[in-house]
Image (cartoon, coloured by chain):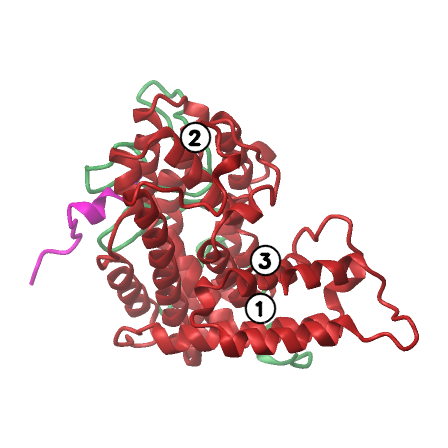
Chain colours: A red, B green
Amino acid sequence: MSSLLLDILNGPEELQPGATNPREDLAALTRDAIAATEDFAFDDDLQLTLFCLFELHYSGIDGTGADWEWHPDLIAVRRLLEQAYEAQLRSIVTLPELPEPTSAAVAGGLFELTGADGGPSMSRYVAKQATEEQIGEFLIQKSIYTLKEADPHTWAIPRLTGRAKAALVEIQADEYGGGAPDRMHATLYAQSMRGVGLDDSYGHYLDSVPAITLASSNLMSLFGLNRRLRGAIVGHLAAYEMTSSLANRMYARGCRRLGYNDAVAAYFDEHVEADAVHEQIASRDMAGGLVESDPELLEDVFFGAAAAAVVDTWMTGFILDAWNAGTSSLRSSATVPA
Amino acid sequence: MSMCGSDAHGGAHDDDAPDDVTALDGGPARSTSRQTIVAFPDGPLLVRGDFDIVDPDGNPLRRTRKTVALCRCGASMLKPYCDGSHKMINFKTEPES
């Protein structure tokens, strides 16, 4: 499926007379694959296909025509994949008891949800025992999202109003460096990657990462690119901000334990301080403000936050299982410097 | 998309508002031209607006963002800034009733 999609993107839109339409073949293949898959979140081909379709809306795919972004045949395939992924999440993600639709109660509910024990901890592992090679893998896994950090949540800006919008913009402005390109979080992350000898070009490690890593990124694009799901993308961002400060302190500690310099740790150091600011704005003003203005979005705010926790717990579990078994968490480890 | 004149466009550009606007409905009072300190329950003091953070001699402290969160639980390792430690120590701003 993903290779057929890349063939389509590299080919012309017009079909030869009498030729079959490869976009129809792609849709048929996609339907069959969705019907056959045992676990959408862990299905490499489905997640990669969805990732590539989403990517048309971000920086695009090198060498392919920019017109494909809104081609109705590809949007139709994207919708099939989005519906299947959302259906899986809706059936698996358990919602907490929903609070009153007030800012204070929503913030309280989110602090409770994100403070609950989420199972095995990546940050503790990185702080205490990850090897140099595992730190490299960790940075690769995280790079799929982090080299475009904040972008999926930015889609929500024009879909919010008032207090929630002002809060989201305040957070995003900080994510993008507050006007200083070298302070942009994605730029700091690229610096960390270079500092440990990795390639920081966007998408370089796409073929190395497992489905669940793509699923974590696709979750944000799904929520961010559908206005209907603006409650979920707001909940997702709140959950990310509210679980970040303490985890990033541990990641920075892991980097320094292995002797990496401040340039490598800078991304993590920045998040300790930044997200201590963001979590307050995200929980009360953004999530709470959204629910106060649109009380019917209460459930989706919590769905988004809970889904973020579920998918990232799966991703952490996948990576730690591999490491505990003495193997690599990547599909091919050839690209990790020894 | 709602039409012009609906609530969706209500009063977003209130540049001439006086500085001491206070929200009476419990919503956030976001003044545009002065500083605000938001005291978050069980959390830090969020300082927003135009201000300097200096040491006792008046020298500016390291600062990398416009809006800052100042530690008030005492446990931060990044003082004067918050680093999220209040959650680890279960800091409460209100006494247990």
Q: Nearer the viewer, residue A60 or B94?
A: A60
Q: In the rendered image, which quarter contains the C terminus of chain A?
A: top left
The residues tagged by marks 1 and 3 sit, at their Cα atoms, a distance apart of 26 Å
Determine which residue is flagged by label 2. A266
Q: In this view, does A71 lie above or below A296?
A: above
Determine which residue is flagged by label 1. A159
Q: Mark 2 — on which chain does it sit?
A: A
Determine which residue is flagged by label 3. B16
Q: Mark 3 — on which chain does it sit?
A: B
Q: Does the magenta stretch include residue B87?
A: yes
The residue lying at 33 percent from left, 25 percent from top is: A258
The residue lying at 31 percent from left, 45 percent from top is: A122
The residue lying at 53 percent from left, 62 percent from top is: A47
Q: Pointer 3: residues within 10 angstroms few (<14), some, or many (20+)?
A: few
Range shown magenta: B82-97
Q: In this view, does A132 lie to the left or right of A43?
A: left
Amino acid, disc 2:
Ala
Q: Is residue A86 left or right of residue A307?
A: right
The residue lying at 39 percent from left, 23 percent from top is: A260
Secondary structure of residue under mark 2: helix
The residues tagged by marks 3 and 2 sit, at their Cα atoms, a distance apart of 41 Å
